[in-house]
Amino acid sequence: MNDIDAVNIAMLIMRLGFGLMMMAHGYNHFFRGGRIAGTGRWFDSLGMKPGRIHAIVASVTELGAGALFALGLLTPFAAAGFIGLMTVAIWTVHRKNGFFIIKEGWEYVFLVAVVALFVATSGPAKYSLDRALDIDDNLAGTFGFWLALLLGLGASHAMLLVFYRPTKKQ
């Protein structure tokens, strides 16, 4: 195996791992644990009102962006979904706990966003639908970086500005 093949296989493994992980989160919200009702109550408790709507939006985004990322299809848009989800998670759940995951900090979710941005910038590589459809060159590089970053951060900041209403501590 030459180095180019190794890079293509490594990128496929990374996309599949992160994409399937994100899909598992969405699946879990829909079909396991407290399902959408429980996830909605959790979103309400975080200050994302109305919680049920945010549970559905987050779960659909996890499933959809995860599938696109794993397939390497419209990769910067999938990466934007990851970045948006992780930015909201950092702000609503993890920021008050510091950096390290051992203390429920934002280390892990930040790394997920960084990987998504890396893949959006580098492109999904040879074993992807973007390559099969011959659109990978149009969506990667500087364009992929800025598309994923600005779309992800823009969507997350809009969600937080419009819907984030944490309970005031007395």
Image (cartoon, helix red, strand yellow):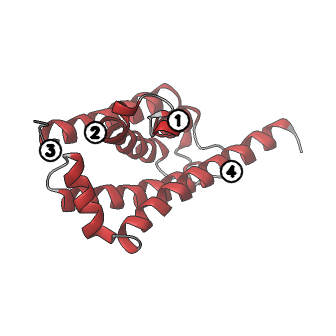
Label 3 vs label 4, nearer the camera? 3
Q: Amino acid at mark 2?
A: Ser
Residue 76 locus on image (x, y percent): 45, 41
Please give the residue where the numbered disc 3 appears in the rendered image: 163
Which comes sooner in the sequence, label 3 or label 4? 4
- Distance between the alpha carbons at the discs numbered 3 and 4: 36 Å
Relative placement, left or right, of 169 versus 12 is: left
Label 1 vs label 2, nearer the camera? 1
Q: Residue furthest top?
A: 142
- Whether residues under marks 1 and 2 lie with C-beta atoms below 8 angstroms apart, the answer is no
- Whether residues under marks 1 and 3 lie with C-beta atoms below 8 angstroms apart, the answer is no
Which comes sooner in the sequence, label 1 or label 3? 1
Check disc 1: other Cα within 10 Å, few if <14, some if 14-19, many if 20+.
few
> Can residue 106 be seen in this snapshot?
yes
Q: Which mark is residue 13?
A: 4
Check disc 3: other Cα within 10 Å, few if <14, some if 14-19, many if 20+.
some
Please give the residue where the numbered disc 2 appears in the rendered image: 156
